[in-house]
Image: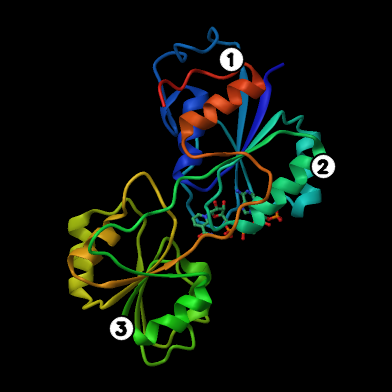
Amino acid sequence: MPRHLLILGGTTEARALAAALTGTAQAGTPQAGPSPAGPPAGTPPLRVTSSLAGRVAAPRLPAGEVRIGGFGGPDGLAAWLRAEAVDAVVDATHPFAAVMSGNAAVAAAAAGVPLLVLRRPGWAPVAGDRWHRVASLGAAAAALPALGRRVFLTTGRQGIGAFAHLDGLHFVARSVDPPEPPMPASTDVLLDRGPFTLDGERALLRAHRIDVVVTKDSGGAATAPKLTAARELGLPVVVVDRPPLPAGVPVAASVPAAVDWLAQHLGRAAVPDAGPQ
Ligand code: NAP
């Protein structure tokens, strides 16, 4: 009977973890043979199920099994963990998916299943950055009129309502799927999905005559090209801080660290070696 891992996903890291654990080079791209550290072919050591919220119309699917849609709050998730005999949960949701992270902490404790949060580090400013850190999208909206008139808004389609009352400003809002009203009266929507290039971000900021950028502190391995482009052009950036993590839950900052934690909790036989960290 294979061990069963649930990955709460919707991020690059969640797909990378699913790929590492299922022995695929990239999510959705099977390797020629079994993972070198894995068991013989035909003996699946680990059942990997990734869960997506279902927000994006055409999501990038991770390797392994995928389920889509909410669980029905912490009680629904706890019931799912029991029914599916889940042995461990990795919360690899986006740093701003705070409701899901809170639900996961409550449900995992209720079901007695070990939980790890996989959370990429936040961004750090470097010399030349003109960042204004704020605690929420509402605070970002309050800060904007003093900073600029033409706003590049990269906080995703769900939070655009926080800026809807700012009639005097023009917004260029980038999201994967179209945002829904309410949104600011003067808004150009750019439907696009990363990864983005520095050349592309520079060109975008110039073409739209952007004078202020708004971003969540989504973080990642390197500085985002939009932040570098803003720095080069001397533009202020409003950076929305992350919500706090649930108390008492261990956190891994990288996929190899998460694999290591899983090996400790599920056994080396079930978890392929992720290599050096
Ligand atoms: P959220 O506000 O924290 O969660 C709201 C509800 O959505 C949860 O209570 C849960 O419903 C459902 N949900 C969220 N993530 C889920 C998952 N991975 N699998 C199944 N159900 C999930 O979440 P959100 O901020 O809307 O984010 C939704 C998804 O988009 C997440 O998977 C996240 O990783 C991804 N994402 C979010 C952002 C962002 O800025 N927030 C950015 C990029 C990607 P039930 O209570 O019914 O279980």
Q: Residue at x 66, y 58 (%)?
A: 99
| Residue tagged 3 | 148
Which tag, 2 or 3, sits closer to the chain's start?
2
Question: Crowding at label 2, few (<14), some or many (≥20) Cα neighbours within 10 Å?
Answer: some
Question: Crowding at label 3, few (<14), some or many (≥20) Cα neighbours within 10 Å?
Answer: some
Q: Give the image location of residue 206, x and y in percent.
A: 18, 72
Tag shown at residue 94: none
Instruction: List the single residue furthest toward the front.
Output: 127
Mark 2: which secondary structure?
Answer: helix
Above or below: residue 165 compared with residue 47: below
| Residue tagged 1 | 268
| Residue tagged 2 | 110
Asked if residue 19 shows in the view, the reply is no
Above or below: residue 258 compared with residue 161: above
* Quadrant of picture, ligand 1: bottom right
Task: Please state which amino acid type lies under the numbered disc 1.
Answer: Arg
Viewer-nearest residue: 191 or 251: 251
Q: Residue at x 71, y 28 (%)?
A: 87
Q: Residue 7's quadrant in the figure?
A: top right
Task: Please state which amino acid type lies under the numbered disc 3.
Answer: Gly
Asked if residue 68 shows in the view, the reply is yes
In which quadrant is the N terminus drawn? top right
Q: CA distance from mark 2 to mark 3?
A: 48 Å
Q: CA distance from mark 3 to mark 1?
A: 54 Å
In the image, taking residue 27 as reference, residue 1 lies left or right, namely right
In the image, taking residue 230 as reference, residue 80 lies left or right, namely right
In which quadrant is the C terminus drawn? top left
Q: Give the image location of residue 129, x and y in percent.
A: 27, 64
